[in-house]
Image: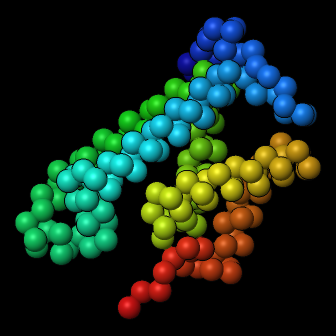
Amino acid sequence: LIWKSEPLVVPISQDLLRGRQLGGLRITYFQVITMATVAVLWGVLHLFMVKAKMGKAIRAFAADPKTSELMGMDTSTVRLMVFFIGSAMIGLAAALQIMDFGMDTTTGLGVALLGFIATLIGGGWGLTGIAITSLALGVIENIGMVVLSTQWKYIILFGIIVLLLIIRPRGLFKTATK
């Protein structure tokens, strides 16, 4: 095996690991950089999806793939661009997570699960709904880990998705379809 049971940590400057104490919460400079990076990336992606021709094509294709193809849209290019954008965002997120928490055999599981649940719940509102849902799920998950234990992390997330599927099978923010 390449990996052992200890996580692999990418070394970063010790200056970035220093931070400030806000009440009972300690925030490192690296976490501030990560939050700023995510905010800028979300803003750029939002502008791309609203203003750019390819962003509008992606939105149209997501709304109705068959009609988009009938209107002459090159759907293979749109699919390739969506794959490229998603892969670039996942790569950046993974790099930031590895520098902060290290890497082991289950590194991407929590992020993938959180992304799946956020897309399922907030996907009806587009990127804004997914961003709001992701933030809310992160807060709920961390409060649950403080109140209960870190061992309950995935149980809390799975509990949220099961509860949602029972209460609102079409998603929290989905609009009624015709």
- Residue at x-position 10% and y-position 73%: 70
The picture places residue 42, in percent across and down from the top left corner, at 47, 44
Which residue shows up at 53% across the image and 40% down it? 39
Whether residue 75 sits left or right of residue 60 in the image: it is left
Q: Is residue 161 above or below residue 26?
A: below
**Quick check: can you spot residue 27?**
yes
Q: Is residue 39 left or right of residue 52?
A: right
Measured as percent of width and height from the top left, residue 79 is found at 25, 53
User: Where residue 103 sits in the image (x, y, percent)?
Assistant: 62, 25
Residue at 59%, 30% in the rendered image: 34
Residue 58: image quadrant is bottom left
The answer to whether one can see residue 103 in this image is no
Q: Nearer the viewer, residue 144 or 113?
A: 144
Query: How many tags in the picture?
Result: 0
Q: Is residue 88 left or right of residue 107?
A: left
Assign the N terminus to one quadrant of the image: top right
Quadrant containing the C terminus is bottom left
Q: Give percent across and percent down for residue 72.
A: 7, 66
* Residue furthest out toward the left: 72
| Residue 110 position (above or below residue 53) | above
Q: Is residue 110 above or below residue 97?
A: below
Visual colour scheme: rainbow
Viewer-side residue, 28 vs 72: 28
Q: Nearer the viewer, residue 146 or 55?
A: 55
Residue lying at the far bottom in this picture: please name it.
178
Q: Residue 88 lies in what quarter of the image? A: top left
x 63%, y 8%: residue = 13
